[in-house]
Amino acid sequence: MEAIRLAVYRSFAETGRAPTVDDLAVSLPREQVIEALDRLGAGRDLVMRDGRIVMAHPFSAVPLGFSVMGQSTLWWGGCAWDSFALPHLLSAEGEVLVATRCPNCAAPHAWAVGREAPPEGEQVAHFLVPVARMWDNVLHTCANQRLFCGPDCVEVWLSRTGHDRGYVMDLTTLWRLAHGWYAGRLDPGYQRRDPAASAEYFARLGLTGPFWQARTT
């Protein structure tokens, strides 16, 4: 199963695309590949829909509001968090160009995001879904971690859509959140953080309170 996980992540990293079952069934029977993908999905290492890979955080096979351009590879950014995380995971990229539009007014935004320092800007990220519920519908969660022109655009969007306010952070906090979250994910033996380790990571960034409390069961 670990070999399949690595093959999926490395395909995303190198090509920007999710591999198909046929791509992965080179040295293993298709049934074993499908079983491994299902288990990886159950373990939240991948997001599967209708037998295909749609996400392997921070990579996405579907557009969710962000594009991320490297030196020669284009990725879909799964969300604001994942888009800012990609240059930290992709060591061959000095920086990437993250592009999106404000969900409220459709103003275009782009940042050169690297590993040394956060990008400048007055824009803010709004996370709609709290941590404990992020995996209830992960595509909905990721589609609603977006970057806005500023707090005013967030408030207008919330009023128009009827959503409750989630969590708003500036670009520096978003960059710091993304900085080490996926460290090691392209390496053999990677293990996802448990709720206690996640809470510790968030707390180091000043992200505390009910919104950032992970589900323990």
Image (cartoon, grey):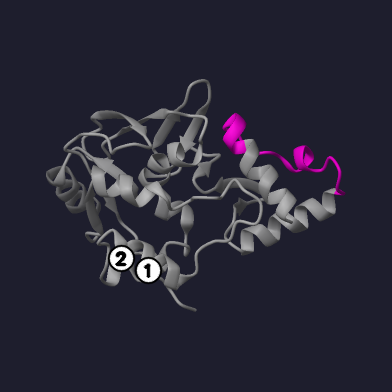
Find the magenta span and give its range. 12-29
Residue 50: % across, % down: 65, 51
Quadrant housing residue 117: top left
Q: Is residue 62 left or right of residue 31?
A: left
Q: Is residue 96 left or right of residue 60?
A: left
Placement of the N terminus among the 4 image quadrants: bottom right
- Tell me the residue at 86%/43% (across/down): 27
* Residue farthest to the front, as pictured: 116
Residue 28: % across, % down: 86, 48
Q: Secondary structure at mark 1?
A: helix
As displayed, is residue 171 above or below residue 141? above
Residue 203: % across, % down: 30, 65
- Tell me the residue at 28%/58% (across/down): 205
Q: Secondary structure at mark 2?
A: helix
Whether the residues at callouts 2 and 1 have beta carbons within 8 Å, the answer is yes
Toward the viewer: 36 or 107? 36
Question: Badge 2 local density, few (<14 within 10 Å), some, or many (20+)?
Answer: some
Q: Identify residue type, mark 1.
A: Ala
Q: Identify residue type, mark 2.
A: Ala
The residue under label 2 is: 203
- Tell me the residue at 37%/68% (across/down): 199
As displayed, is residue 43 above or below residue 81? below
The residue under label 1 is: 199
